Amino acid sequence: MIRARIRKSFPARAESAAFSLEVDFSTSLGVTVLFGPSGAGKTLTLDIVAGFVRADEGRVMLDEEILFDAATQVHLAPQSRHCGYVFQNYALFPHMTLRENLKFAANCADSRTRKPRLERHRKVNEIIERFHLEDVAGRRPNEVSGGQKQRCSIARALIGEPKVLLLDEPARGLDAPLRAELYAVLRQVRADFGTPIVLVTHDLEECLELGDEMFVLRDGKLVQSGPPVRVLDQPANVEVARLMGIFNILEAQITALDPANKTSRVKVSDFELSGPYFPGKLRGDRIWLCVRPELLAARPRDGKPGPNQVAVQLARVIDKPGGVRLEFSGGIFVDMPRFEFEPERHNKEWVVEFPPDALRAL
């Protein structure tokens, strides 16, 4: 488990704005995801844990071992930290075959954990077989596919039996089949090796696919943490909701609160909606109403809208795998299965229903 309290600052320079990273977190035993937009400090955090960058202040611990402590001037070299690192570009040696890349990693293990020569040879053969690289082990990186390079890169990071595996946007640039293959490999790593994983990404689907715990970074600060599904369902603020790609974020005002019945009424533009009770909010408060597109229901308009239904006009249709995203007037988005939408494609007048329990106040 990693426990890190980190502060790292970069002063403003010509053609470079100042940046400060200040985070405090502990990882779980499963897959921990560092999520956020480009420039949030995700890779910098990973590099500080790995020892490639030295923090200005703080402490980094892996299990009970101190990797970095500014107060006592402890700063272990990367090769002494027992961290496996998978780079965005794989970083395989281009003049070596895949087998030679793996042998090099096995031979460079820390002297405290380096195994005898025959044991290292056996380990290389075993990991080549486990990652299905037998048919390409004699080829160089430029002679194999992206997926094979990715598997070799992960295998190389694991061959030294690290205490944690660090991955910097491992799915970046991969097409859908290779992405699915990568996810399968990482699930295999979890099952076979039991190695904790810390993964950097800005892809929400990747968080939901792999993550047990999620840390959301923005502008060098940790703004929310928790299981990915919970963060998606309950973003801490409107900035996190936007980072998560939640499309329906509407300005609203609370017009009524009923704690006894755990209900509320909110006014959004020129319509009102019933919602759940919002603890900590008062009548008259201005809020951001947040609701995910897949939780809304839409149907062609036929008469007067009912409770929690809003009359809208269809502005645009966005195709998605297995369905469509409908953009309506007022900036309202709804996800719908394709087979439900196709018979009604010609309709421009629709009704959108907001389930009360789906509404979140930020």
Image (cartoon, rainbow, N blue to C red):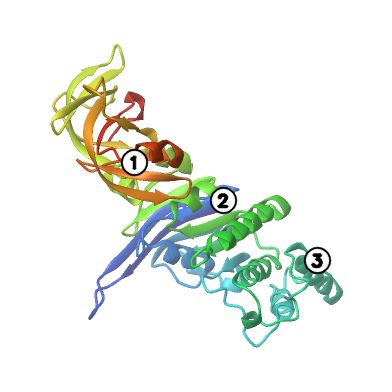
Q: Of helix, strand and loop, which one carries label 3?
A: helix
Q: In front: 49, or 313?
A: 313
Q: Which residue: 26% across, 76% down?
A: 16
Q: CA distance from mark 1 to mark 2?
A: 42 Å
Q: In the image, residue 177 lies at what x, y percent?
A: 58, 60
* Picture residue at 44% right of the left edge, 51% below the top: 204
Q: Position of residue 122 (x, y in %)?
A: 84, 70
Quick one: label 3 or label 1, which is nearer the N terminus?
3
- Distance (Cα) linking label 3 and label 2: 24 Å
Which of the labelled discs sits on residue 345, or is there none?
Answer: 1
Residue 31 tag number: 2
Q: Quadrant of residue 21?
A: bottom left
Q: Kindly identify which numbered label has been placed on residue 126.
A: 3
The residue sitting at the right extreme is 118
User: The disc labelled 1 sits on which kind of residue?
Assistant: Arg
- The amino acid beneath tag 2 is Val
- From the viewer's side, name the closer residue of 114 and 252: 252
Residue type highlighted by circle 3: Glu
Q: Crowding at label 1, few (<14), some or many (≥20) Cα neighbours within 10 Å? A: few
**First reached walking from the N terminus: tag 1 or tag 2:** 2
Q: Residues within 10 Å of mark 3 (few under 14, many from 20)?
A: some
User: Which residue sits at x=74%, y=78%?
Assistant: 99
Q: Is residue 212 left or right of residue 236?
A: right
